[in-house]
Image (cartoon, coloured by chain):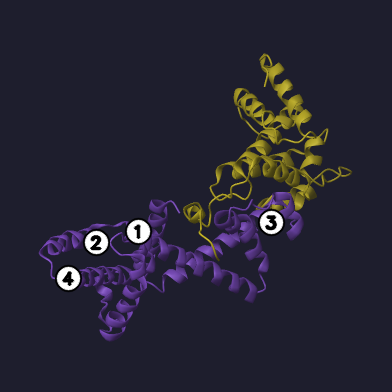
């Protein structure tokens, strides 16, 4: 190693379990990569539970191959949405989570919003006001891809209408 | 030691090599300075720096006394005191030590990655962490990271980075352990390192 280490203090600020710093473009790439990755790999250590939930799918119900497919499903299985919600919440809360906190939070609100919009029961008891706030936050992220954005917008509209809230500009 | 001497305003640059050579020859070799270090009384780094400071002051006094000037004698005391309390060179010494510690850690980590067939760990650490911190290069973008290492999900990317960071931290501890021979001193060395680079804004 030659030359002066200009960023030595920044360099050493990392701890083994600290989150890695990603920029906005990287967040967009990570989000896209995550929703297109094979579903059985994308949920980390929830994969075993996911495999079990897939086995329990009704006959003829195809297994979603990715998170995106799950979010686009007109009748998404409650167990899979619940696992996605758990994964998203964990990533948004744990100090040493694998995904950036923002990406985890977006997945968390997406899973609950879509469950609410498509009338899938028993996924979350999150109050409507918090869900609206969360969906608005997710839609304000410019790294949310064009495929997922309309789905989140529709979910937000459904929740707002059910509560009598008017849609505010994002 | 050179970093310390380079930072001493009272030491002309052309005197640095002679002082360094004299300290090594007179103190370290002839008086067997290292054997005098007492592990119970603190860090070897501090002991070495204190010995060097004393040597510089003694040399300064000796040279001034040789001039046999009453006016110079007063200057000698003032200058000697200034040498003793001016801690900027000490920070240079500490910073040089910190850089050496980190450089040694990085070199060992790289060798260990090559030896164990985990060059991916070194490469991902190098292009995401080391290059940006030391060379000011832009970190490898996530898309390119995924393509280069064939990562199927973001979790795999995260695991790779986390493993590399843990390996760096583990190697840093093992290098620091060579400066300190018990766990508490190792921890102190690492805390010193963080404090030094924080103060030095390196």
Quarter of the image for the N terminus of chain B: give it: bottom left
* Mark 4, other Cα within 10 Å: few <14 / some 14–19 / many ≥20: few
Q: Quadrant of residue A85?
A: top right
Q: CA distance from mark 1 to mark 3?
A: 41 Å
- Which residue is denoted by mark 2 in the rendering? B83
Q: Quadrant of residue B127?
A: bottom right
Q: CA distance from mark 2 to mark 1?
A: 14 Å
Q: Nearer the viewer's eye, disc 2 or disc 3?
A: 2
Q: Is label 2 on the same chain as label 3?
A: yes
Q: Secondary structure at mark 2?
A: helix
Letter of the purple chain? B
Q: Chain of mark 1?
A: B
Sooner in the amino-acid sequence: mark 4 or mark 3: 4
Q: CA distance from mark 2 to mark 3?
A: 54 Å
* Residue B31: x %, y % from top left: 25, 84
Q: Secondary structure at mark 1?
A: helix
Q: Is residue B109 above or below residue A39?
A: below
Sooner in the amino-acid sequence: mark 2 or mark 1: 2
Sooner in the amino-acid sequence: mark 1 or mark 4: 4
Q: Quadrant of residue B76?
A: bottom left
At 50% from the left and 63% from the top, the residue drawn is B169
- Which residue is denoted by mark 1 in the rendering? B91
């Amino acid at each position: 190693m030659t030359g002066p280490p200009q960023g030595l203090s920044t360099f050493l600020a990392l701890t083994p379990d600290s989150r890695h710093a990603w920029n906005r473009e990287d967040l967009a790439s990570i989000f896209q990569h995550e929703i297109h990755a094979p579903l059985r790999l994308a949920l980390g250590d929830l994969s075993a539970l996911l495999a079990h939930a897939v086995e329990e799918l009704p006959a003829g119900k195809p297994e979603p191959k990715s998170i995106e497919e799950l979010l686009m499903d007109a009748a998404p299985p409650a167990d899979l949405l619940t696992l996605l919600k758990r994964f998203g919440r964990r990533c948004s809360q744990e100090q040493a989570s694998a995904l950036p906190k923002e990406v985890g939070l977006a997945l968390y609100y997406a899973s609950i919003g879509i469950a609410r919009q498509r009338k899938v029961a028993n996924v979350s008891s999150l109050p409507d006001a918090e869900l609206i706030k969360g969906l608005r936050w997710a839609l304000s992220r410019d790294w949310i891809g064009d495929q997922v954005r309309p789905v989140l917008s529709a979910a937000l509209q459904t929740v707002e209408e059910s509560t009598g809230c008017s849609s505010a500009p994002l | 030691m050179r970093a310390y001497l380079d930072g001493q305003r009272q030491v002309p640059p052309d005197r640095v090599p002679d002082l360094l050579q004299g300290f090594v020859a007179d103190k370290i070799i002839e008086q067997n300075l290292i054997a005098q270090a007492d592990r119970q009384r603190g860090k070897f780094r501090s002991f070495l720096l204190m010995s060097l400071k004393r040597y510089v002051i003694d040399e300064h006094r000796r040279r001034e006394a040789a001039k046999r000037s009453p006016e110079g004698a007063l200057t000698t005391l003032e200058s000697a005191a200034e040498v003793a309390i001016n801690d900027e060179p000490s920070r240079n010494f500490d910073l040089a030590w910190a850089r050496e510690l980190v450089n040694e850690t990085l070199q060992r980590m790289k060798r260990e990655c090559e030896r164990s067939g985990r060059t991916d760990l070194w490469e991902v650490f190098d292009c995401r962490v080391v290059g940006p911190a030391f060379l000011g290069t832009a970190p490898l973008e996530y898309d390119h990271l995924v393509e280069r290492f064939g990562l199927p999900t973001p979790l795999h990317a995260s695991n790779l980075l986390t493993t590399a960071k843990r390996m760096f931290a583990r190697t840093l501890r093992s290098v620091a352990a060579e400066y300190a021979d018990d766990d508490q001193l190792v921890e102190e060395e690492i805390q010193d390192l963080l404090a030094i680079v924080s103060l030095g804004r390196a």
